[in-house]
């Protein structure tokens, strides 16, 4: 299952997600990615060419509310760049939210097969 960072409020989850994204964007820029005027990361093709405008990343994750009322977003350790311990250390620095493994009890039961 997926590891998530857990917050008491949407405001706290949003603020932490912004920190993760902005720090990740700084590293992306150092690695040759373009940041647009709004701070989005513009994608690149495998050949290293700037991708279409639609290929833009503007968030690490969107916080979701669990059934218990707490807010979560995916832990940055699931990003491919987290294979580099320094990347994960940098994006997580100062964030002290607890991490929890996802549980089926977090989400409403659906009729999906």
Image (cartoon, helix red, strand yellow):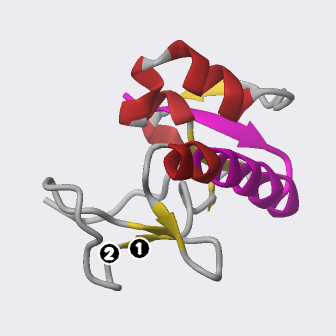
Majority SS type along the magenta span: helix
Q: Which residue is mark 1?
A: 56
Magenta-tinted stretch: 1-24
Query: Looking at the picture, does residue 37 appear above or below residue 65?
Result: below
| Residue drawn at (19%, 62%) of the image | 45
Q: Which residue is mark 2?
A: 55
Q: Which of the pair 7/23 is nearer the observer?
A: 23
Q: Secondary structure at mark 2?
A: loop
User: Where does the image place residue 61, in percent across and percent down from the top left?
Assistant: 54, 56
Q: Quadrant of residue 56?
A: bottom left
| Residue drawn at (86%, 53%) of the image | 12
Q: Secondary structure at mark 1?
A: strand
Image quarter hosting the C terminus = bottom left
Image quarter hosting the N terminus = top left
User: Where does the image place residue 65, in percent across and percent down from the top left?
Assistant: 65, 58
Within 10 Å of the Cα at label 1, are there few (<14), some (14-19), or many (20+) other Cα atoms? some
Contact between marks 2 and 1 (CB within 8 A): the answer is yes
């Amino acid at each position: 299952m997926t590891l998530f960072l857990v917050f008491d409020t949407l405001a706290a989850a949003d603020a932490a997600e912004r920190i993760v994204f902005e720090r990740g964007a700084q590293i992306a820029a150092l690695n040759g990615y373009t940041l647009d005027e709004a701070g989005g990361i513009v994608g690149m093709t495998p050949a290293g060419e700037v991708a279409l405008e639609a290929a833009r990343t503007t968030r690490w994750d969107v916080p979701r509310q669990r059934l218990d009322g707490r807010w979560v977003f995916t832990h940055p350790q699931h990003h491919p760049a987290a294979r580099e311990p320094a990347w994960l250390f940098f994006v997580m620095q100062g964030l002290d939210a607890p991490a929890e493994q996802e549980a089926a009890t977090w989400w409403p039961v659906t009729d999906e097969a």
